[in-house]
Structures are given as structure tokens and as C-alpha cells.
Amino acid sequence: MPSILNCKKLQKFDLIRRQETWTLTLKGWVITLLFLMTMTLVSCFNLYPFLAVNAPIQADALVIEGWMPDYAIKAALVEFEKGNYQKIITTGLPLSKGYYLAEYKDFANLTAATLVKLGLDETQVIAVPAPNVIRNRTDATAIVLREWLKTYDLNIKSINLYSLGPHSRRSWIIFKKYLHPDIKVGIISIPSKEDQAQNWWLSSEGFRTVISEFIGYLYTWFFNFLG
């Protein structure tokens, strides 16, 4: 080996130095792996309820995310009828499929029409559609709702946002971001039938949905924190 790589010579020129390092023993690795497995199990049992948050308030209006499936819309109608709400407001983007064949071109109006079909008085429901966007779709619906409430003064000072499963916490953060402090925002989450809330990690659909929503929550929280 060339003399230039001699450790003593390199040490003489202050290019390298010898130091003591610590590493895990076999017992240390076992304990570390057990700890990581335990934390993973704890996360599995608590991640879904953390994302599917419920924190309702006494509210003037019930706001529904219009993209939700019909069973969630029916459940929202039950919540509206038992609550002391003035109005029910539906939000949503343009339809992503069937737009040219559908009578209703966006999820907000489609959901409003569904509620009327289910028996709701049409004077009690208001559709507030958002424009088509590629990114930050929930932000778009929240912004449009904020501007609509400013334009049409209905004396709405508080809302309960009705969302689906693990999407709920992210939606709650976003709506609070754009409506607070003028309007208080509560959240009601309906369990998703597709995600199998109790054992979401056992199905590909549940795992994909919950993990993607968790990543979305971290993204939303991070940029909301920076803002």
C-alpha cells in the first residue's frame, strides 16, 4: 500500500484521528426492535381514530364535503335533523367523471340535490361549488365557502364540518385555517365503510387510504405551521 495512505502519516497531517465508538450489543438490538414493534402496534391502533377525529360544537350550519358516498350523505341528513342547525351547506369540485352526461356538474349541487331527494326541504340546503383545481382541493372548497359566507350574510358564526373517516382531521385543519377566527369550526367524522376502521392495516385499501391521509395530514400540518 502506498505510503501516503499510512495511518500514522495521515494522523501527522491532522487528516484523520482515532476515536472510540459505541454500538448496540445483541441484547441492545433485541430491546430496540421490540420497542419499534411496540410503537408500530400502538400507531396501528391509534392512527385511525386520530385521523377520524370528532369534535363537534354547537353550530349554526352543517357543512358537508360533497365528494362523500351516499351513505355518508344520509348520515349527515340525520345529524342535521337532530341538531339545531339553520342551514346545511354542501361543498365540492366539478365532477371528475360523467360531467358531460350528468344533470349536476359538481359535487356540491349533486349532494344538495341528493339531500332534497332524501326529503330535506330545498330551502334549507345551499350548494357552494368550488372551481376545478389540480392541487389543494380541500383548500379551494374552504376558500370558496369563506368568500361565500362573507358575500351572503346569513349570520353564520359557527359550523360543524361533516367529513369521512381519516380525511376528517386534515379537512378540519384546512377549514379552520381559512374560516377562523370569524367562524368557529367543529368536526364530525363518519366511519368509512371501505377502510375497516378497526383493522385498517389488514386490507390494501385501508392501508393505502390511512397512510396516504396521514402523509397528507403531515403535509398540511407542516405548511400550516410554517404559515
Image (cartoon, helix red, strand yellow):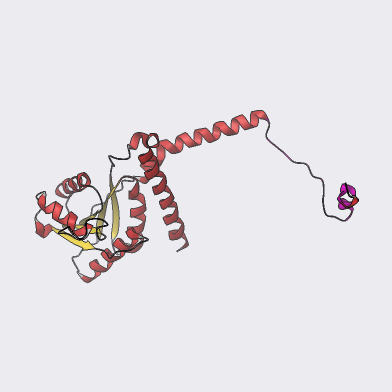
Residue at the image position 46 percent from the left and 57 percent from the top:
222
**Residue 176 sits above or below residue 207 on the image:** below
Lateral position of residue 17 relative to residue 211, left or right? right
**Residue 76 sits above or below residue 181 on the image:** above
Q: Quadrant of the C terminus?
A: bottom left
On the image, the x and y values in percent for residue 183 come to 28, 62
Q: Chief secondary structure of the magenta span?
A: loop
Q: Is residue 60 visible?
A: no
Lateral position of residue 122 relative to residue 45, left or right? left
Q: Is residue 18 magenta?
A: yes
On the image, the x and y values in percent for residue 30 come to 60, 29
The residue stretch that appears in magenta: 5-25
Closest to the observer, 75 or 155:
75
Q: Quadrant of residue 139?
A: bottom left
Q: Is residue 127 magenta?
A: no
On the image, the x and y values in percent for residue 71 come to 20, 44
